[in-house]
Amino acid sequence: MDIEGFARDKIQKNNHDVVESILADRIMEYKEINHDNARLMARAVLEEVTNTLKIHESEDEFLKEIIGFNEAQVGMGEMGVGSRGAGDFFVHRKIAEIVASTQTGALINPTAQDDGGVVKSTIKGEDVYITTAVDGIHSRLSEYPFLGGFHVARASLRDVCVMGSDPVAIISDLHLADDGDVGKLFDFTAGVAAVSELVNVPIVAGSTLRVGGDMVLGDRLVSAVGSIGVSPYPPTARKRAEAGDIILLTEGSGGGTITTTAIYHGLFDVVWETMDINFIQASEAIMHAGLLPEVHAMTDVTNGGLRGDAHEIATTTGLGMEFSHEKIRQMINPKVLDMLDSLNIDPLGVSVDSLMIIAPEDVARKVEKVISQSGVRVSEIGEVDNTGVPRMIKDDGGVEELKPLFREAAYTKIKKLVGDTTPEDFELMKEKVEKAAQESIHKKNKVVKAIRDN
């Protein structure tokens, strides 16, 4: 429970005594303290929040602008942020625009909507490409910290590998709410460390804090794991795909999403199917065979499933892609596929954590061979063309254009209740989000100018 947020909302609608009493009761639901101490804590929170509201009385208009934020008046859930669909992709493009407005010159920055970012450096006359990526723990794995750490570490390393980089370091940022058991910190770190040990990439730094400090009660765990990789070759970014390229896909067993699906449906044996490092093995096989410079692009089938990835690649490159529905299904772990089918979850709309490789046909055949020799299943599933449209050839011969839904395929009961239908006012929501993003860029520019001028 966010007691600061609660106080901030209620204090503007009720008098202090009423809010203090309600807040004290809420605090006692989480803390084993008596009513008098709960009232003291509630009173302190209200005093702090009241002090922050005094900024509106300040004559420093610029400071008021910095302290406040540009409200889009659109909620995260309304927009589908984090749900890996059309709304989420739109918001991420706005974030990328804010990053791009700095004009700091990364080789691959968030505007490419790629898996990782890349900067180019020259050391002793040799070009070196440095890739960084960061992923957050799956929100529904807060109660399962080892699995959360394991899968977020894998996800971060995957994002480095698909850019053609050799992972060299892992970093971890861990936040646990005030009432969380310290053991969660250790189990999460052990999950990250298990992946670190399996792929021989060291954990080199990290941070551990409380979620919201004293202001958030409960035991929610939120965290992120980042990875750093290096390569002597240019990145295998999506924009390098070319018409005529063959599309390969490795077997996908899923990660955090599939684990969450299995746990919350009581299908616990499926969890074991996700516990592997096949993705990294496949990436390393390509690197060690010296084929990386000849591969045009690589990506992991995660955000919004293959529907989302195909759409993003087509948007980035202007190219089209033709996929075989039957061949895609054959490259999903059989137990995982059975679970998705039995629960009526679209396998093309969720993260199955496959490696997708896009390369000229002769290169694709070599890649297929070395990945198979590494012990990972891989197969051709389609081809890149000039149509500008990603589409799938269905089992009955029909053709379906691959478009991301407003949210990824619903893989828990609560997600099914929320639904994936695009809101009727989606265009209006996008306009509001666009305006808020542009105002944030404007604020950033003003602050940078003010600091430089001083």
Image (cartoon, rainbow, N blue to C red):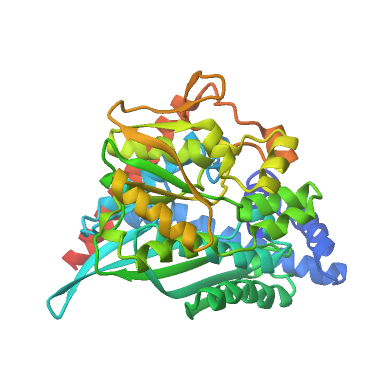
Foreground residue among 37 and 75: 75
Q: Position of residue 37 (x, y in %)?
A: 81, 72
User: At 51% across and 23% down in the image, what residue appears?
Assistant: 425
| Residue 73 visible in the shown view | no
Q: Is residue 164 above or below residue 415?
A: below
Q: Quadrant of the N terminus?
A: bottom right
Position of 139 with respect to 433 (left or right) is right
In the rendered image, which quarter is residue 271 located in?
bottom right
User: At 30% across and 53% down in the image, what residue appears?
Assistant: 295
Q: Is residue 209 above or below residue 338?
A: below
In the rendered image, which quarter is residue 46 located in?
bottom right
Q: Position of residue 260 (x, y in %)?
A: 69, 52
| Residue 151 visible in the shown view | yes
Q: Position of residue 327 (x, y in %)?
A: 52, 37
Q: Quadrant of the C terminus?
A: bottom left
Foreground residue among 363 and 6: 363
User: At 58% across and 41% down in the image, what residue appears?
Assistant: 330
User: At 29% across and 47% down in the image, what residue appears?
Assistant: 362
Position of 325 with respect to 180 (left or right) is left
Q: Is residue 246 above or below residue 321?
A: below
Foreground residue among 338 and 377: 377
Foreground residue among 376 and 432: 376
Q: Position of residue 284 (x, y in %)?
A: 42, 66
Can you name the residue that lies furthest to the left here? Answer: 125
Q: How many marks?
A: 0
